[in-house]
């Protein structure tokens, strides 16, 4: 159940006419009262002798009783309450009870208060009601409406439990503004999948993903085809910006502009500027996953995805082990990586990745203030993804996409756990939704490379040799991994690492040193990508294998230092 406190109004008769009228798109059916401050209030919807003006005069009487100098200009209060699509249809009596509970919870008409404000609840659809009230009490005082939106949400959670409705999570005030009914109807009329507000939010988030300056951010907005206005102070300083879709016009044919803050709290210009904080120096005891010496760089999307995978893995460790401000920053930037990945993905994974980024948007914000600077590596990864171009989804490009999605899934899952511990219910749910989309995208992206590895690992002698390695390195989970369908692919990867000059036992130990594997759906799949990343093996198993000398401890130490500098 979703209650929404609307903007205060000045004309009672105007809102009454809307509530009893046909609606903008003839969507109002059988408008009528379900409850009011007085059971004898005339209902223009059911009583042919009652008029809108009769109801307006009764509601406005306490306002009109005040001297003109004391009458509030905006005195019309409006609350809508809507059930979920899957909820059963409530009766008029049930909606009347819900209306009385809402006006009591918000301070409009506390239970038992005989001098409270006058109000009326109108139903013109199966799934919602509107409550109109005038905010002058019978005794001439104003109602106590402090935190009315939060209190209405709290009461909605109780009503859901009492009526067996879908249980929603209480918000914390950091969610993006929902599209209005008018915006939704306009989107339907123009056959848009999403409202202009939602389309703009997604476009601005993608433009901000990994951007490293104002110039780059505004260039991306322009290249995305948006109309952009900059708000400049008399001094010449840039104060803010607004954006619009070229084909979204008002009734006068003018573009409808939205400021960044109206799209989402973290898309205002000051909040976007916070992302450009200089990178923080790592402390000497900072836990950074060591990397082996780099091979000659792979250019293009594949190289950017490998670098992003490493950065995502390090961000995952920060979420699980760093302080809450640093963790919050990594979670926020994780949204940028998902936006960049969706923007540059191949067609066959684009929809799921786009939906993952869209869902995770809610998980990227909370009241825990992000400490910027430590998130520089992940932001650079998002920047590189955007500038590396779109992946074709084949060969090394496609396989490194699967590698990155696999690690991003673990990152998003860690974010969900972090939010759950902080009791951020909406953010945790959003992260879980994003994880499901990432899981679907991974299954698509990984199908070809994992199939090749599975075929190469079907040799029983090869499996027996690598099973010895697995039991020696990971005795606690070895039998579980050996029973998984993905074991042949892991066995092939261990053989690849050995052929490339690495010690597979040492690699397995390194792959599991920093984090448990209990949350992984397939431990063998996770280990395949970790090993191929750590050993710098081609993500595409059909490619030729690199060969180099076994890694020495000094080389490993040098790589660790290089990783710290990044």
Image (spheres, rainbow, N blue to C red):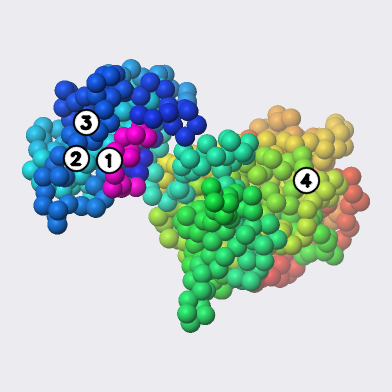
Say which quarter of the image contains residue 84.
top left
Is label 4 or label 3 in front?
A: 3
Please name the residue that numbered disc 1 is placed on: 12
Q: Taken as a whole, is the magenta stretch helix, strand or loop? A: helix
Q: Which of the marked residues, 4 or 3, is nearer the chain's N terminus?
A: 3
First along the sequence among labels 2 and 4: 2
| 404 left or right, relative to 55 | right
Measuring 38% from the left and 25% from the top, which residue is drawn there? Answer: 124
Relative to 233, does residue 176 appear above or below in the rendering? above
Residue at 78% across / 53% down in the picture? 390
**Looking at this view, is 472 or 368 the one in front?**
368
Mark 3 burial class by Cα count in 10 Å: few <14, some 14-19, many 20+: some
Mark closer to the chain start, 3 or 2: 3
The answer to whether the residue labelled 2 contacts the one labelled 1, judged by CB atoms less than 8 Å apart, is: yes
Task: Pick the quarter of the image with the C terminus.
Answer: bottom right
Q: Which label sits in the foreground, 3 or 2?
A: 3
For the record, the magenta segment spans 7-19
Judged by depth in the image, the label closer to the viewer, 1 or 3, is 3
């Amino acid at each position: 159940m979703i209650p929404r406190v609307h903007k205060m109004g000045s004309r009672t008769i105007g809102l009454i006419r809307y509530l009893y009228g046909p609606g903008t798109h003839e969507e109002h059916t059988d408008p009528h009262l379900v409850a009011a401050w007085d059971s004898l209030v005339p209902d223009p919807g059911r009583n042919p002798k009652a008029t809108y003006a009769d109801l307006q005069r009764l509601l406005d009487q306490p306002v009109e009783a005040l001297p003109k100098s004391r009458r509030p200009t905006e005195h019309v209060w409006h609350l809508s309450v809507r059930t979920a699509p899957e909820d059963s249809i409530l009766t008029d009596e049930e909606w009347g009870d819900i209306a009385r509970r809402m006006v009591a919870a918000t301070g409009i008409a506390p239970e038992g208060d005989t001098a409270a404000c006058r109000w009326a609840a109108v139903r013109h659809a199966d799934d919602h009601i509107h409550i109109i009230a005038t905010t002058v009490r019978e005794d001439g005082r104003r109602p106590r409406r402090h935190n009315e939106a939060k209190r209405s949400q709290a009461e909605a959670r109780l009503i859901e439990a009492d009526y067996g409705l879908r249980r929603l999570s209480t918000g914390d005030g950091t969610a993006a503004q929902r599209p209005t009914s008018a915006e939704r109807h306009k989107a339907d009329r123009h056959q848009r999948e999403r409202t202009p507000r939602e389309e703009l939010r997604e476009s601005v988030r993608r433009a901000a993903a990994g951007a490293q300056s104002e110039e780059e951010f505004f260039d991306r907005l322009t290249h995305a085809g948006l109309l952009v206005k900059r708000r400049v102070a008399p001094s010449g300083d840039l104060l803010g910006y607004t954006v619009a879709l070229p084909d979204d016009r008002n009734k006068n044919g003018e573009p409808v502009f939205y400021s960044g803050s109206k799209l989402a709290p973290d898309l205002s210009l000051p909040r976007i500027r916070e992302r450009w904080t200089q990178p923080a120096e790592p402390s000497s005891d900072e836990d950074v996953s060591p990397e082996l010496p780099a091979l000659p760089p792979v250019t293009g999307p594949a190289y950017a995805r490998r670098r992003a995978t490493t950065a995502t893995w390090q961000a995952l460790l920060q979420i699980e082990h760093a302080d809450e401000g640093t963790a919050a920053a990594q979670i926020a930037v994780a949204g940028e990586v998902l936006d960049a990945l969706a923007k540059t993905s191949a067609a066959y994974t684009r929809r799921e990745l786009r939906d993952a980024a869209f869902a995770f948007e809610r998980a990227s914000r909370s009241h825990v203030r992000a400490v910027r600077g430590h998130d520089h590596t992940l932001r650079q990864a998002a920047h590189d993804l955007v500038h590396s171009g779109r992946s074709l989804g084949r060969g090394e490009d496609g396989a490194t996409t699967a590698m990155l999605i696999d690690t991003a899934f673990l990152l998003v899952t860690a974010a969900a756990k972090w939010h759950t511990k902080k009791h951020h219910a909406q953010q945790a749910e959003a992260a879980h939704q994003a994880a499901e989309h990432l899981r679907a995208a991974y299954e698509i992206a990984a199908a070809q490379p994992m199939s090749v590895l599975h075929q190469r690992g079907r040799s029983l002698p090869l499996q027996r040799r690598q099973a010895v390695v697995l039991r020696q390195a990971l005795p606690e989970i070895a039998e579980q991994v050996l029973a998984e369908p993905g074991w042949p692919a892991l066995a092939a990867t261990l053989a690849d690492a050995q052929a490339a000059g690495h010690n597979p036992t040492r690699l397995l130990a390194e792959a599991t040193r920093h984090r448990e594997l209990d949350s992984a759906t397939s431990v063998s799949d996770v280990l395949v990508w970790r090993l191929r990343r750590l050993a710098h093996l081609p993500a595409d198993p059909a490619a030729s294998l690199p060969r180099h000398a076994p890694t020495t401890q000094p080389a490993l130490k040098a790589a660790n230092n290089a990783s710290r500098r990044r």
